[in-house]
Image (cartoon, helix red, strand yellow):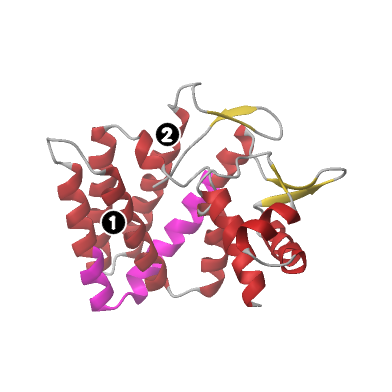
């Protein structure tokens, strides 16, 4: 199992950081060499990633990194908007005081960074953002939701959105986090869900606004690549 996990982590990391771009072919021999394991665990890791939707098996090609059409990406955002709104509502009901305090601290730090006039450290903002969403997901306390969201959020198309945000969009995104924390503190699930839906759809709008200089080939048509989300 350790060998399978090692191969799985190697492939998955390469997909998420863009080392294995959409529509590229991944061979067992290549991964075995990179991860230092035999081809048998690599084969199992490839099947696992296929089940998660990150790979496809194509006749006469083998394992190919999944790509998305414009319709696919619109669907991803719609599903995220529904599921993450539900997640926020559940977090409003189940979050502990410690979790709410953690979320408030992260939201305030992100908001302060986003407003820096001398330039924003996008890596720092992205790290705070990821922590915020992770704790919020934990606060919701649903294993089924965790499994579904993992497939929707951790695809390459939604890995680095902040690098495409304007300064105003960065501030707005951080402000959404502050509003979500207020809703959690008041145990207001409806408000938390509404803000989260606006949060996700704002990310979709930022994606739509990207220029044609960032293109990936989808299954049906070319689409601008969204390198991150939230």
Q: In the image, is residue 89 part of the stretch drawn in magenta?
A: yes
Taking the spot 74% from the left edge, 51% from the top edge, the residue there is: 27
**In which quarter of the view is residue 137 placed?**
bottom left
Does 213 appear above or below 203? above
The answer, for residue 192, to whether it is visible in the render is yes
Q: Is residue 71 left or right of residue 154?
A: right
* Residue at image location 37% in from the left, 45% down from the top: 198
Residue 205 bears which disc, if any? Answer: 2
123 and 6: which is toward the camera:
6
Which of the 4 image quarters holds residue 185? bottom left
Seen in the image, is 225 located left or right of residue 30?
left
- Residue bearing mark 1: 128
- Which of pointers 1 and 2 lies earlier in the amino acid sequence? 1
Q: Decide: few, some or many residues near mark 2? Use Cα within 10 Å; few <14, some 14-19, many ≥20.
A: few
Q: Residue at x 64, y 52 (%)?
A: 54
Say whether residue 25 is left or right of residue 209.
right
């Amino acid at each position: 199992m350790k060998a399978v996990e090692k191969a799985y982590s190697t492939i998955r990391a390469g997909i998420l950081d863009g080392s294995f771009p959409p529509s590229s072919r991944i061979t067992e021999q290549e991964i075995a060499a990179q991860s230092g394991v035999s081809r048998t665990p690599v084969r199992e890791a490839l099947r696992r990633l296929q089940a998660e939707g990150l790979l496809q098996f194509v006749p006469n090609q083998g394992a190919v990194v999944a790509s998305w059409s414009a319709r696919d990406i619109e669907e991803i955002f719609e599903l995220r908007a529904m599921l993450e709104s539900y997640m926020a509502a559940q977090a409003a009901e189940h979050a502990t005081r410690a979790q709410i305090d953690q979320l408030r601290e992260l939201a305030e730090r992100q908001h302060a960074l986003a407003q820096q006039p001398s330039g924003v450290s996008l890596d720092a903002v992205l790290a705070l953002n990821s922590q915020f969403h992770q704790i919020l997901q934990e606060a919701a306390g649903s294993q089924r939701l965790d499994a579904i969201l993992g497939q929707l959020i951790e695809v390459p198309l939604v890995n680095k959105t902040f690098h495409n945000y304007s300064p105003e969009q960065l501030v707005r995104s951080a402000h959404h986090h502050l509003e979500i924390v207020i809703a959690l503190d008041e145990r207001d699930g409806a408000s938390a869900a509404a803000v989260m839906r606006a949060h996700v759809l704002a990310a979709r709008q930022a994606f739509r606004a990207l220029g044609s200089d960032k293109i990936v080939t989808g299954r049906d048509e070319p689409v601008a690549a969204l390198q991150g989300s939230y």
